[in-house]
Image (tube, rainbow, N blue to C red):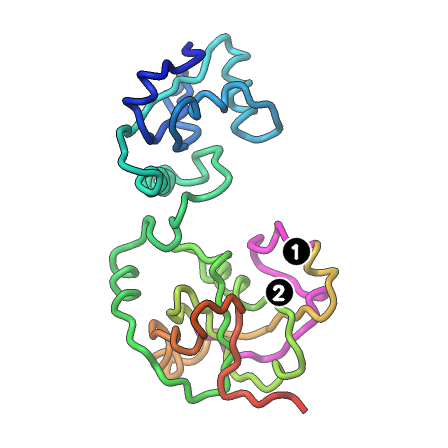
Amino acid sequence: MTNSIPHDVARHLGYYVYLLVNPRTEKVFYVGKGQGERILDHLTANGESQRAATVNAIRSEGLEPRLDILAHKLPDEETALRIEAAVIDLCGLGELTNKMRGWCSIQCGRVPLDELASYYAAKPVTITDQVLLIRIARLFRHGMSADELYDATRGIWRLGPRRNHVQYAFAVFEGVVREVYKIESWQQASEARFKTNIHKQNQPKLLRAKNRWVFIGVVAGETVQSQYKGRSVAAYFRTGSRNPFKYVNVKSAT
């Protein structure tokens, strides 16, 4: 097992993308990027991560994880980050001990071609209904189920009485409408029930917060869908704004 990487070797490696492999199964269990001796850090780090547990399990069998360099002599860190993200997308988080998808993977990573084409071809739309635009960047992923998209969109949001005058909620990612829901009612987050675990990580904290709301609704009818779904609403958000939602054609509550 390599305990260190000589300076001359590190210089030739430059930025690289690496794999940790279980030598018994030949299965990749971690993907990373770095330079210098970064690849060795995971072999000495302690902790309760799934990666550390996998390393310890391999060692309990009298073996050592294999360290593979997938790509090296990369021109810069951004290139390494993009390759790392693409490999994680290819393998799938379910097959790895990585906790998160790679850098810019949601925006630039693995996406079905028809979905990518529809995104870049999205034409702006003028909203004529009373709408709440909801950006779900942190929870969105390509290929998510309809129930996951619904749960991600419906809450949990800090909203005032103005919400009661909204007809439709738009699930928005990267400025494009991914789904349109007709809002039937609102309920306090503490009373909400979700079909999926998409809010599992933050749900306990958010459900205890005051003034957090979740809508109950259904996918809008075909006429409304055809008018808005797949269209760009990016122009409704100010450049640089991080606010996750935007009211359109909804008067302020009095």
Callout 2 amino acid: Ile
- SS category of the residue bearing label 2: loop
Q: Is residue 186 magenta?
A: yes
Report which residue position mark 2 lands on: 156
Q: Is residue 252 left or right of residue 6?
A: right
- Quadrant for residue 232, please give it: bottom left
Crowding at dot 1, Cα within 10 Å, few <14 / some 14-19 / many 20+, comes out as some
User: Pointer 1 and pointer 2: residues touching (CB < 8 Å)?
Assistant: yes
Callout 1: SS? helix
Q: Residue at x 71, y 66 (%)?
A: 191
Residue type pointed to by label 1 = Gln
The residues tagged by marks 1 and 2 sit, at their Cα atoms, a distance apart of: 8 Å
**Residue 14 against residue 103 in the figure, above or below:** above
Residues in magenta, as a range: 180-204
> Is residue 42 magenta-colored?
no
Q: Nearer the viewer, residue 24 or 163?
A: 163
**Quarter of the image with the N terminus in it:** top left
Residue 190 to residue 34: above or below = below
Residue at the image point whose x is 40% and y is 32% from the top: 31
The crowding category of the residue bearing disc 2, from other C-alpha atoms within 10 Å (few below 14, some 14 to 19, many at least 20), is many
Where is residue 236? Give x, y as percent.
Answer: 43, 78
Measuring from the top left, give residue 95's x and y in whole percent: 43, 35
Q: Position of residue 204 (x, y in %)?
A: 70, 54
Q: Is residue 126 left or right of residue 138?
A: left
Q: Nearer the viewer, residue 43 or 199?
A: 43
Residue at image location 64% in from the left, 74% down from the top = 159
Check disc 1 and report the residue beneath it.
203
